[in-house]
Image (tube, helix red, strand yellow):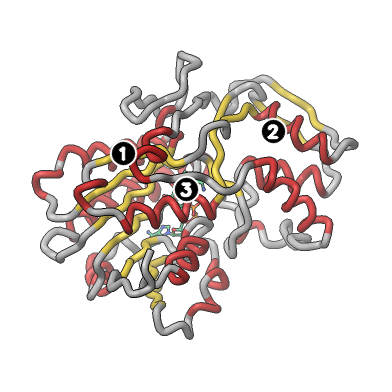
Amino acid sequence: MSSETNQHILIVGGAGYIGSVLVRVLLEQGYRVRVLDALLYDNHSAIADLLNNPSFSFIHGDLCDEATVREALRDVTDVVLLAALVGDPVCKKYPDLAQQINDIGTIHLIDQLVGRDIKHLVFMSTCSNYGLRETDSEAREDAELNPQSLYAETKVKVERYLLESTSRFDFASTILRCATAYGLSPRMRFDLTINEFTRELALGRDLLVYDADTWRPYCHVNDISRAIGLVLDAEPSAVAEQVFNVGSPGENYTKRMVVELLQQRLPSAQVRFQEGKVDPRNYRVDFSRIADRLGFRAKVTLTDFVVELIDVINKGRFADGDDQKRFYRNS
Ligand SMILES: NC(=O)c1ccc[n+]([C@@H]2O[C@H](COP(=O)([O-])OP(=O)(O)OC[C@H]3O[C@@H](n4cnc5c(N)ncnc54)[C@H](O)[C@@H]3O)[C@@H](O)[C@H]2O)c1
């Protein structure tokens, strides 16, 4: 990526867990970046240190508000859509708001992009859309979607809208179905499996794990940000109307495998397992398309990261996690 780009990227939801890492990756790559974010979790500190950067601008507002979106789109060349109520629990708790933001508001925002000379739209979707797979095979992008929650249903709805409306669009739209994220971020989330399990066990707490033999893919937040950067850097014709799974071969795990990996580093860790179909999702995912077409290779493995997070927690960082639940969790 050259540092002479004229691309000016709007990241909607850029103060969140993935967004606040992505913003820094794109600024380093020479892009100008604007964030539109409603700061639902009082997460202003995740981008506060960027406010003096001349290549960065911030608009505090709601993606559902048409005038705010119009202002945010001024002079922008590309849009990354991250904002949503993210995760099954928060969508279940606030179902009307989830529909309003993740579905109705997001689709309305997409419609507002037409006629603005936008080059790329990257829509952040999720591998959760594969939901409950009846087979052990890894899901490719053309596999049947089987959402198990309102969260995934709203993501599937926007995906369908994007794929069915392409004739009306004058920009290249790309859907990224992302593995469950882990890693350090200026807006840390400890309601994500790897971050949560590692923190709880590193702090010497008992961990209760539901549905331990269900599979999921995982990907580091820096690698996810690099994948988004690859799409923004690609020729629009190479990524238009495309769906890519974002993750890495060999990085599908059951929760039991994650626990075993953690217990190798934390031998006294106490874990109880409970079968209860609390979370029925069970999916393994194939990541060859993004590797073959965009050359994406993840740099971090789950094994690397748990060592890093245990070390960080042992040094006392995130000791305030329980006091700052709102900042560290989507609930
Ligand atoms: N974190 C993961 O494991 C994961 C995995 C797959 C896909 N994704 C997708 O990646 C995206 C980002 O996830 P995240 O983990 O960073 O979530 P997050 O909750 O940390 O970030 C979302 C951000 O969007 C903002 N936002 C929410 N509603 C808004 C609105 N109406 N207007 C403006 N801003 C609003 C929030 O304030 C927050 O800063 C989401 O679309 C999510 O579905 C995440």
Disc on the earlier residue, 1 or 2: 1
Q: How far, Cα to Cα, is label 2 from label 3?
A: 22 Å
Whether residue 301 is visible to the viewer of this picture, yes or no, is yes
Q: Position of residue 270 (x, y in %)?
A: 85, 34
Q: Is residue 308 left or right of residue 14?
A: right
- Under circle 3, the secondary element is loop
- Under circle 1, the secondary element is strand
Instruction: Decide which of 96, 316 is in the foreground and name it.
Output: 316
Which residue is at 21% across, 60% downward?
A: 119
Q: How far, Cα to Cα, is label 1 from label 2?
A: 28 Å
Q: Amino acid at mark 2?
A: Val
Which quadrant holds the N terminus?
bottom left
Q: Position of residue 309 (x, y in %)?
A: 73, 52
Q: Is residue 51 left or right of residue 112?
A: right
Q: Residue 178 occupies which quadrant of the picture?
A: top left
Q: Position of residue 284 (x, y in %)?
A: 50, 26
**Cβ of mark 3 under 8 A from ligand 1:** yes
Q: Position of residue 41 (x, y in %)?
A: 54, 62
Q: Which residue is mark 2?
A: 258
Dot in front, 1 or 3: 1
Q: Which residue is mark 1?
A: 243
Q: Amino acid at mark 3?
A: Val
- Under circle 2, the secondary element is helix
Q: Amino acid at mark 1?
A: Val
Whether residue 33 is visible to the viewer of this picture, yes or no, is no
Q: Are marks 2 and 3 in contact (CB under 8 Å)?
A: no
